[in-house]
Image: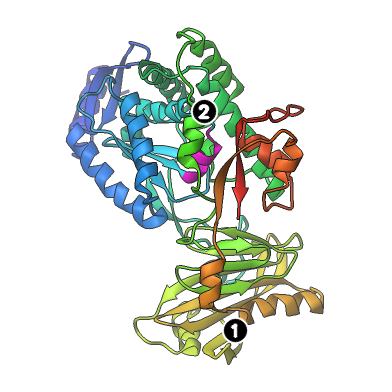
Amino acid sequence: MESLMHKIKSFFTYMLILPTLFVCACSTNPATGKRQFTALMSPAQENSVGAQEHQKIVQQYGLVTDKKLNDYVTALGKRVTEDTERPDVQYKFYIIDSPIVNAFALPGGYIYVSRGLLALSNSEAELASVLGHEAGHITGRHSAERYSRGVVTSLGAGILSAAIGSQGASQAISLGSNLYLSSYSRDQENEADTLGLRYMTRGGFAPQAVPSFLYSLQRQSDLDARLSGQQGNRYNYFSTHPATDQRVAKTKAESMQYPQTGINNRDAHLKAINGMTYGDSERQGFARDNNFYHPELGLKFSVPQNFTIKNQPSQVIALDNKGSLIVFDMMGNKEGYAPLDYIRSVWMKETQLQNLEEINVNGMKAATASFPGQINGENVVIRVVAISWKDRFARFQLAIPRGAKAALVEDIKKTTYSFRNMSANEKKTIKPYSVKIIAAGVNDTVKTLAARMPFKEMAEERFRVMNAMAKGTEVQSGALYKIVSE
């Protein structure tokens, strides 16, 4: 049996040969006052890593460029982080151009909130609670620790949960590269909650905003699940910030320990986000009914009426409830391949293809091929289509269940042939949705205001969640409310 002394010697030898990215630190937990031993980056390394990962964030999602909106978030962030336990950190605040409700922090003081989170917030205090929480992850060095475990990466996330029974199918039916951050531990979330409360109250904000916004986040997550018919959005706030009943109760109890006289500034926040893009932006492209538009690229296509369109950073997917799936993305063609050669020699070169042929899509050269596969144990025909478009290929991957009715097969095929350039008039008139702040009139109700939004499903539920209104409550004449406007 190995001696205790030998074990100790081996341990310290191991610590000495750790990669130079990490340093070992015995520090005091700023939230609890307890001593802790962790492998962490140095501040200089945190800054370097944060700067590197920031470029990935910008490339993958893009940032909101509205100066007034950015100045608003930065001013709140500076107010919240003016007095933290890490004066060496230069905090930087950014708005991600994403409709997903999320916020996160990177080593080096980089703090991000999404457009979706700004739209869900109902006061300056609620937004300050999020900024304070993310600052807590930085001062608690959770972001550095999380990165030390290699959790900020670029992943090819497959949309299909089951293996596809064809060698080339996983390449054909897949999601593009997405930045992925693993969730914080429960202890880290609790610590960030405690620190965030400390920072936001030091900034003069009302502590009740912490539990109130957690409740709004939970309601939005539940609404997303109902709208999608699934178990919520994988990439929402709770995917990286796990919520538990105990955590919410703890936050509520802790908020009562602070003076209850802080500010909320509800109207100021609503006025700050008035006119902000809601949902997908022009840069990302957006869906309208069964059509997908991308004004920045200048393209459009349609999917069958009963399909749901889900826009991802690198591709668009559309699916029905019968096992059919459509994936659209773009791929560069610097080599100048013809569509048929591209499918046969590059894209699907490892796959035994069937029905390989050249086609024409609205005057554009294209090619298509098919091969058998399986999705979730069901036999499907996977058809790939490559369309020459400018200096790249527009690609469709269509998964059609075997035995599908002829009408469905024909509708899915029409998706390919619907691909075309947007007209100049379409680029001018078809715009993303936006947040609009209105004052309720004397005769207004939740129902009348919700009816002004461009949603066919659950309009009243969406309005209540957006405005943090409980079921059964009504709007008040003269008060400001958020709606989504075309």
Q: Label 1: few (<14), some or many (≥20) within 10 Å?
A: many
Q: Is residue 342 above or below residue 315?
A: below
For the point 56% across and 45% down, the residue is 436
How many marks do you count on the picture?
2
Q: Which residue does the numbered mark 2 point to in the structure image?
A: 266
Residue 197 forms part of the magenta stretch? no
**Element at label 1:** strand
Q: Amino acid at mark 1?
A: Ala
Q: Is residue 163 left or right of residue 64?
A: right
Q: Quadrant of the N terminus?
A: top left
Residue range of the region highlighted in magenta in the rendering:
115-121
Residue drawn at 26 percent across, 36 percent down: 108
Numbered tag placed on residue 167 in the rendering: none
In the image, 259 versus 361, the foreground residue is 259
Give the image location of residue 255, x and y in percent.
50, 13
Q: Nearer the viewer, mark 2 or mark 1?
A: 2
Q: Is residue 83 visible?
A: yes
Residue 167 visible from this viewpoint: no
